[in-house]
Amino acid sequence: MKDRRSILVSFRRDIHRSHVNGARLPPEFQPEFENSQHPYMLLDPGPGLRIVDINDAYARATFISRSDVVGKSLFEVFPDNPGDEFADGVSNLFTSLRIVAQTGHAHAMSVQRYDIRDPGGNFIERHWQPINTPIHDRDGHLIFLLHHVEDVTAQVQRQSGQHGGRDPHLQS
């Protein structure tokens, strides 16, 4: 939790911009963001929810590279798994990000099944514990959304093995 707080403090103290497009993390903040062991993605809250940056932990957890995703729409990079008729990750994440943008407060989501593509392009099952946090400039304007996830797939699979399969209560 301390790691997340220090990232938020750094964002609030150091980020200045008039337009999100083309915005970059301040040079003095970049090492802290990149070296965090926790997966973080920085989003432009404007139309398209463009990916501004990801850290190395996020890249490892999701099998993507920074150069392949920066500037792209969040849901272009992370669509729902078309092979899962119950997939609702896009809808749930969009709703959470909208709540954060509208209220100006962080939103901790319940555990979400949100499958991702492996390096070969095949969807693999993943379960995440996401927290979405608004980042405001000194004048209180929303400038970024910070998306933090923890991969809880192993725990969910252990639990579902004990309960006989997919538990729909773990993803709403």
Image (tube, helix red, strand yellow):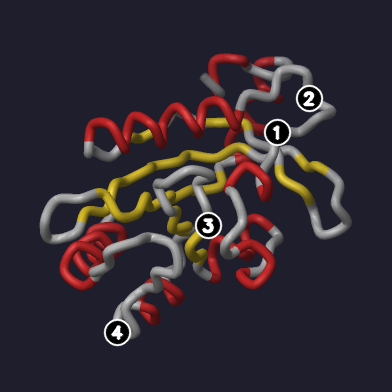
Q: Amino acid at mark 4?
A: Glu
Q: Amino acid at mark 2?
A: Asp
For label 4, the residue is: 28
Cα distance between the residues tagged 1 and 4: 35 Å
Q: Secondary structure at mark 3?
A: strand
**Reading the chain from its start, which is encountered first: label 1 or label 4?**
4
The residue carrying pointer 3 sits among few (fewer than 14), some (14 to 19) or many (20 or more) residues within 10 Å by Cα, namely: many
Q: Secondary structure at mark 2?
A: loop
Tell me the residue at 34%/61% (across/down). 19
Cα distance between the residues tagged 4 and 3: 20 Å
The residue closer to the viewer here, 39 or 101, is 101
Mark in front: 2 vs 3 = 3
**Reading the chain from its start, which is encountered first: label 2 or label 3?**
3
Q: Are marks 4 and 2 in contact (CB under 8 Å)?
A: no
Indicate the quadrant where residue 4 lies: bottom left
Mark number displayed over residue 84 = 2
The residue closer to the viewer here, 26 or 5, is 26
The residue carrying pointer 1 sits among few (fewer than 14), some (14 to 19) or many (20 or more) residues within 10 Å by Cα, namely: many
Image height check: is 158 above or below 168?
A: below
Mark in front: 4 vs 2 = 4
Cα distance between the residues tagged 3 and 1: 17 Å
Q: Are marks 2 and 3 in contact (CB under 8 Å)?
A: no
Mark number displayed over residue 80 = 1
Residue 142 percent across, percent down from the top left: 26, 49
Q: Amino acid at mark 1?
A: Asp
Q: Are marks 1 and 2 in contact (CB under 8 Å)?
A: yes
Residue 13 percent across, percent down from the top left: 16, 69
Mark number displayed over residue 51 = 3
